[in-house]
Each structure stands twice: as structure tokens, then as C-alpha cells.
């Protein structure tokens, strides 16, 4: 006759059963890439855009097939987050070595009123001349692309009419060389982790 489980044994068994499904998921698909960034493969947003760059050429995701594309939002007068993000992507490209040419950075401004093509040309060359800035043509176009990418932005008035700042989402979207949305990287992720993620996407 089977002896009844002691209370401590029952607790141990329940804990084992609780984690069993998680262990099973991990063990069943060992070939799935282990990304540092958040895997959002198959998401039904951030799938497309059609925006002019700082040189006046209209761009879409299809223009960058064969490359990993990093899309992030910001504005040129941002005091810290935007220049930090751009500097990090330049370093990521450098660390990729020969694969660096297969990384395309796209910076979408949330401040098209001040971020004119001329301003963005001068701004982007300070980081990497191959990175492109994309410019929504008006407030409606900005609202549309923000909705598609599920990002937020808000004008914060300063002491004078022209001294406002822009609060905005600070993460980056990553697309694989087939143009498929794959990852979301939160602001502050380490450079070496993103380098590893991009190497996986390039395989």
C-alpha cells in the first residue's frame, strides 16, 4: 500500500510540476536562437514605413534587404538618449568588423518641425554617414508612423517657444536580412549583447 506523502514532499512535488512545462519548452526547441533583446518575431506592428530620408529619397524597408536594420526614434536636440543610442550603434557596427556593412541604422525624427533635411545631414555625419535619418513630412505622417511602431512622443514646452523638448520611446527595432521584424532592444542594453544578436540574425 502506497504511503501518503508528507506535507514537505507534497510541496516539493507541486514545485516540480509547476516548473515542468517551462523546462519542457526549453528542451523541446534547443535550436531556437537565444537573443539578448526581446524576440518579437511575428508581431503585427512595426512592419512598414514610407518616409523620405535626409537626402530627399523616399525609403521603405524593402530598400535594405540583405542587411540587419535597426530602427530607432529621436530628435537632434535630444540631450542624452539619442546621441548615446547613435554612438552605441556606431560601436556595434565597428565591433561587427567585416559584417558592419550589413548593418543599416535608421533614425526617425519625432521633431520634423526643427529636424529639417539640412539639420539631419549635419547631425548624422557626426555619427556614421551610412546611417539614414527619416523625416515624417507633417504631424499626421508622424502620428501614423508612431502608431505603426507603437512608440510614444510628447512635446514638452520650454521657457521659450523654440526651446521645447520631446519625450519619446527610446528602444530600437531590429529586422533580419529578409526584412522581417525580429527583435526589440530596450534602451540601455549592452553593446556586446546587441552585437551577438545581430550576428545571430545574419546567420
Image (cartoon, rainbow, N blue to C red):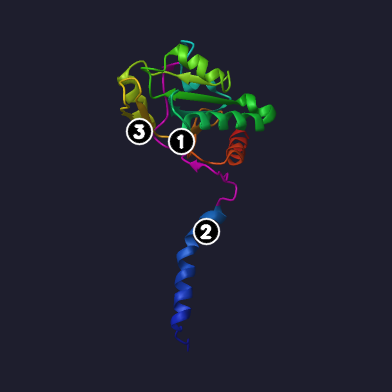
- C-alpha span from label 2 to label 3: 37 Å
For marks 1 and 3 on the same chain, the one whose residue lies earlier in the sequence: 3
Residue 166: name its quadrant.
top left
Residue sitting nearer the eye, 25 or 187: 187
Q: Main secondary structure of the magenta part?
A: loop
For the point 44% across and 85% down, the residue is: 4
- C-alpha span from label 1 to label 2: 31 Å
Query: Of helix, strand and loop, which one carries label 3?
Result: loop
What is the magenta range? 29-52
Residue sitting nearer the eye, 3 or 142: 142
Q: Is residue 33 visible?
A: yes
Residue 46: name its quadrant.
top left
Q: Is residue 82 magenta?
A: no
The single residue placed furthest to the front in the displayed view is 159
Badge 1: residue crowd in 10 Å (few <14, some 14–19, many ≥20): some
- Which residue, given by chain and number where applicable, does mark 2 sit on? 24
- C-alpha span from label 1 to label 3: 11 Å
Image quarter hosting the C terminus: top right
- Which residue, given by chain and number where applicable, does mark 1 sit on? 171
**Above or below: residue 155 compared with residue 57:** below
- Which residue, given by chain and number where applicable, does mark 3 sit on? 152
Find residue 52 and report its horizontal and vertical position in percent: 43, 15
Left or right: 103 as drawn, with respect to 114: right
Badge 3: residue crowd in 10 Å (few <14, some 14–19, many ≥20): some
Find residue 181 and report its horizontal and vertical position in percent: 48, 33
Q: Is residue 58 visible?
A: no
**Mark 1 and mark 2 residues within 8 Å of each other at the beta carbon:** no
Amino acid at each position: 500500500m502506497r504511503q501518503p506523502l508528507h506535507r514537505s514532499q507534497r510541496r516539493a512535488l507541486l514545485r516540480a510540476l509547476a516548473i515542468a512545462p517551462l523546462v519542457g519548452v526549453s528542451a523541446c526547441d534547443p535550436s531556437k536562437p537565444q537573443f539578448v533583446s526581446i524576440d518579437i518575431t511575428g508581431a503585427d506592428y512595426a512592419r512598414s514605413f514610407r518616409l523620405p530620408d535626409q537626402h530627399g529619397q523616399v525609403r521603405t524597408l524593402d530598400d535594405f534587404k540583405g542587411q540587419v536594420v535597426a530602427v530607432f526614434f529621436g530628435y537632434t536636440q535630444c540631450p542624452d538618449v539619442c546621441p548615446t543610442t547613435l554612438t552605441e550603434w556606431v560601436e556595434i557596427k565597428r565591433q561587427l568588423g567585416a559584417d558592419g556593412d550589413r548593418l543599416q541604422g535608421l533614425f526617425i525624427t519625432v521633431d520634423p518641425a526643427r529636424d529639417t533635411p539640412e539639420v539631419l545631414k549635419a547631425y548624422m555625419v557626426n555619427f556614421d554617414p551610412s546611417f539614414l535619418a527619416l523625416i515624417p513630412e507633417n504631424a499626421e505622417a508622424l502620428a501614423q508612423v508612431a502608431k505603426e511602431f507603437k512608440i510614444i512622443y510628447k512635446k514638452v514646452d520650454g521657457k521659450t517657444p523654440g526651446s521645447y523638448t520631446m519625450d519619446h520611446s527610446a528602444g530600437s527595432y531590429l529586422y533580419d536580412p529578409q526584412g522581417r521584424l525580429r527583435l526589440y532592444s530596450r534602451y540601455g542594453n549592452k553593446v556586446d549583447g546587441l552585437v551577438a544578436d545581430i550576428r545571430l540574425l545574419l546567420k
